[in-house]
Amino acid sequence: MQLSTPDFIVIGLFFVLMLVIGLWSMARNKTAEDYFVASGQLPWWLSGISHHVSGYSGAVFVAYASLAYTHGFSIYVWWAFTIGITVLLSARLFPVLWVRLRKRLQIQSPLEYLTVRYNLLTQQIMAWSGVLLKLFDVGAKWTAIAVLLNVFTGLPLIYGILISGGVSLIYVTFGGLWAVIITDFAQFIVQILAGLIMLIMVVRHLGGWNEILTFWNDLPEGNSQPFNSPYTVGFALAFLCINFLSYNGGTWNLATRYISSPDETQAKRAAYLSGTLYLIWPLILFLPMWAAPLILPDLQDPSQSYGLLTLKLLPAGLVGLVVASLFANTMTMTSSDINTISAVLTRDILPVLSKRLKEKRASLVVARATTFIFTLMTLVVASQNERFGGVFGLIVTWFGALVGPIAVPMLFGMLPVFRHCGSLAAIGSIAAGFVTFIVTKNIEITSLALAVALPLIVSLSVFIGLGLWNRNRPVSEAVSGLLKSLEHEG
């Protein structure tokens, strides 16, 4: 079974909506500050929704759907629950610090303050490594979208890449952060509608709403438990630490949501909204995936479970809505990444390479050109995915592993308790985390929790250790002044 004409109409209308939003947002951008951080005027409810949906991609409906099929409820505990808890618990800390950094230093990129906090070399190492890795990461997400479209329509991968990537290229290039934020909101509505419809159809198939509480007893052993090996308590704690760093700004596009807030109160509200959504919405979104073993027993490829559920249970037109929501999730994440990476390129890298570009640092033309070129490069990477083979997948995995090591000096560098952790500690922690990741990939580690957490543990240990070794040396006036200014509201 493939998509019908009503389904294609729904998907087409979704893409048209994205383009219209991009062109409408274009008028809101007068300067690069508008383009990258919405001039610090992003309302808390838009920021919170965008922060929330930027954490989803097509992987939720492929890889995570597969884990929901094979390991049940544990996917909620170690993924969504740990994100929600960390965002809520830190809502009064890092969101506030990001806003203060924008006001104190007029930053438009999460990396800009690192030149003052550490030095230019540290900032450039973090900027170049993050941009290069994101090039492959975003390319992989375009490929994931194309794979999903291929499952439903049989459309060749290259066309799926060009359609989804081409639409995003247009609305992100013209609209900047406002386009990303407004499309995030539109995509959130699409996701809610598709998720609720899917839930209703699954409940009807199971026999009624009472079955929500009883169908767990019929699932494979362990699927109803909060921890299902290898996704143990230790694994959940490891992800708790990683998500603490990632969702507070270690993943750069999420930091931008806080940087763009008008004031500290609105930044905190955005965090509370995003964290609450992570605790509630995945329970609804994943329920069809948890019930899939009863509706589609003995699947050879569990990663197809959500797509097959959609085709089995939904009528024409509604299938298109679900497919549009799959597009929405991945396009939300990729467009958000692209806008932030463009800010890093425009504000942190290009001015170092050229004095002429430094003079045009605030140029909206440079911002749009950087966005267009980077997006185009990700589409080239996606279109050539077969040439990368296993290396392509490895590089994508590298990005995930580097979130922790890069986030350690970025986030902890804002805290006065780590004032003695200088550039050596920052660069050393990144290098140590990276080397540890390579080692863990080349030796057998029986504990999945340890394999996931080890790069972060080593990175954090090196950062703290070098800070303690440096504790008797004076801290520069620039660093002391920055940290002191971040302690006070204003």
Image: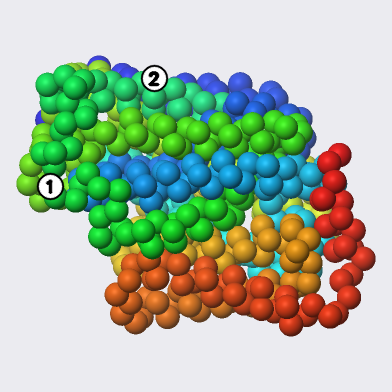
Q: Nearer the viewer, residue 57 or 144?
A: 57
Residue in the foreground of this view, choosing between 109 and 21: 109
Which image quadrant for residue 154? Answer: top left
**Mark 2 Cα-neighbour bin, 10 Å: few <14, some 14–19, many ≥20:** few
Instruction: Evaluate whether residue 208 shows in this view.
Output: yes
Q: Is residue 121 left or right of residue 463?
A: right
Q: Residue at x 50, y 53 (%)?
A: 243
Residue 207: x percent and y percent?
12, 21
Q: As rendered, which of 39 and 490 lies closer to the eye? A: 490
Q: Quadrant of the C terminus?
A: top right
Circle 2 residue? 13
Residue 294 lies, in percent from the top left, at 11, 37
The three-letter amino acid code for the residue at tag 2 is: Leu
Residue at the spot of label 1: 220
- Res 163 → quadrant: top left
Q: Position of residue 259 (x, y in %)?
A: 70, 41
Q: Secondary structure at mark 2?
A: helix
Sequence-first disc among 2 and 1: 2
Q: Amino acid at mark 1?
A: Pro
